[in-house]
Image (cartoon, coloured by chain):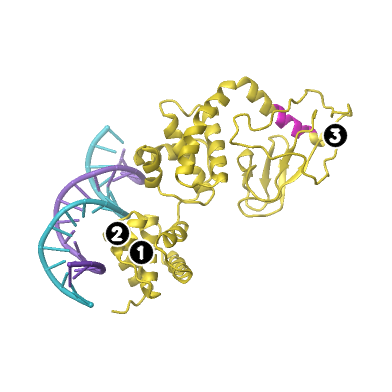
Chain colours: A yellow, B purple, C cyan
DNA sequence: AAGACGAAAGTGGTTGA
DNA sequence: TCAACAACTTTCGTCTT
């Protein structure tokens, strides 16, 4: 196999989907020209479009191997990369590709030197997988979580925190990154870590790793809550419409997103003649009826929504 | 009787001096 | 570090359907 190692390249910005990306060879990063997002290793597993190339034929579009598996302790890249700038036939590699090689070498260096890093990740994987499957989290979320966990270890952020705590926090961060929102309560339920601790660790991670995370928005919960309540498509659409209008009236910021989502769904369920009682909605959204009533009142008042009596 | 309503007191987290 | 504060919860009595 020799040096026939595969590198993936990203075509579009995962944030704004612009295709105008600038490669900063010095840092080994991609920068989005449109939104300025720095796309680093964190994003390698995102986006459906892959273009594979190897060092001999960099324009070949063929896939010559599996993508790096981030849930494997050694990242699934077991090929050894030599230190000469030559390919497997002994030809020298164009300067353009040397930066790529440099990045690969960096990883290998980390793998060798940081055997303990890999071992620590490996020991956390069972916990991570247990929680993730307990919550039915998709694979891409797990992979994103492993990447976050890896960074946490590399930055030595584990001290004084249990593996489980860090694993849960990583998963929570990853689920938010991937737009698969779950509440802190759900995470603490499955993991038996305290919600308080998970939240604190999550914020700590977000700050230290400079994770770009948007604050949770009510819209993120609508789909799942509606499904849980057995509500139809039109209710979902209506709830989202209410939320969109609520956004314009500044009725969302500063409020708990689950509460706002619950109230919007409650209203939508009445208006669409698929009435759900406050108790039901409150239970699925994990808020109290009182909260729903408060949000409900605000929404109905400010948006002039009429509820037939 | 079930559901909705809202007042009052308590909790945990954020913010700002 | 402490106090003020807003959001949310718990509890409970009352009104409506």
- Marks 1 and 3 belong to one chain: yes
Q: Is residue A155 visible?
A: no
Q: Residue at x 47, y 34 (%)?
A: A127
Which residue in the structure is indicated by mark 2? A291
Q: Work out whether mark 3 precedes mark 2 in sequence or the reverse, and give the earlier one.
A: 3
Give residue A98's mark. none
Give residue A94's mark. 3
Residue A242 pos. (x, y %): 43, 69
Q: Label 1's element?
A: helix
Reply yes or no: does residue A104 show up in magenta: yes
Residue A283 position (above or below residue A109): below
- Marks 3 and 2 belong to one chain: yes
Which residues lie in the magenta part?
A98-105
Magenta span main SS:
helix
Reply yes or no: does residue A130 show up in magenta: no
Q: Label 3's element?
A: loop
The local crowd at label 3, few if under 14, some if 14 to 19, many if 20 or more residues have their Cα within 10 Å, is: few
Q: Chain of mark 2?
A: A
Query: Which quadrant is home to the C terminus of chain A?
Result: bottom left
Camera-side residue of A302 and A169: A169
Tag 2–tag 1 contact (CB < 8 Å): yes
Q: Residue at x 29, y 59 (%)?
A: A291
Q: Residue at x 68, y 35 (%)?
A: A27
Q: Chain of mark 1?
A: A
Disc 3 to disc 2, how far (Cα)?
Answer: 63 Å
Give residue A263's mark. 1
Disc 1 to disc 3, how far (Cα)?
Answer: 60 Å
Mark in the foreground, 1 or 3: 1
Q: Work out whether mark 2 precedes mark 1 in sequence or the reverse, and give the earlier one.
A: 1
Residue A14 position (above or below residue A265): above
Residue A104 pos. (x, y %): 71, 30
Residue A188 pos. (x, y %): 38, 41
């Amino acid at each position: 196999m020799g040096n026939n190692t595969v590198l993936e390249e990203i075509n579009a910005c995962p944030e704004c989907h612009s295709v105008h990306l600038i490669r900063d060879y010095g840092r080994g990063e991609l920068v989005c020209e449109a939104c300025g997002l720095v796309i680093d290793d964190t994003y390698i597993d995102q986006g459906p479009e892959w273009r594979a190339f190897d060092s001999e034929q960099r324009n070949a579009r063929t896939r010559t191997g599996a993508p790096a598996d981030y849930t494997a302790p050694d990242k699934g890249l077991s090929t050894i990369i030599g230190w000469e700038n030559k390919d497997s036939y002994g030809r020298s590699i164009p300067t353009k590709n040397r930066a790529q090689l440099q990045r690969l070498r960096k990883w290998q260096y980390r793998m060798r030197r940081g055997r303990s890093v890999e071992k620590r990740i490996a020991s956390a994987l069972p916990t991570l997988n247990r929680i993730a499957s307990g919550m039915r989290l998709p694979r891409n979320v797990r992979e994103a979580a492993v990447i976050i966990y890896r960074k946490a270890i590399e930055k030595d952020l584990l001290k004084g925190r249990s593996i489980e705590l860090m694993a849960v926090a990583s998963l929570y961060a990853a689920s938010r990154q991937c737009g698969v929102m779950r509440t802190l309560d759900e995470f603490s339920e499955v993991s038996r870590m305290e919600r308080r601790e998970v939240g604190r660790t999550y914020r700590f991670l977000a700050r230290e790793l400079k994770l770009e995370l948007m604050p949770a928005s009510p819209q993120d919960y609508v789909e799942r809550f509606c499904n849980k309540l057995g509500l139809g498509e039109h209710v979902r659409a209506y709830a989202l419409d209410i939320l969109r209008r609520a956004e314009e009236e500044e009725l969302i910021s500063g409020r708990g997103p689950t509460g706002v989502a619950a109230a919007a769904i409650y209203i939508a369920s009445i208006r669409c003649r698929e009435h759900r009682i406050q108790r039901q909605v409150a239970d699925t959204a994990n808020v109290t009826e009182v909260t729903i009533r408060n949000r409900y009142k605000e929404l109905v008042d400010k948006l002039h929504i009429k509820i037939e009596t």
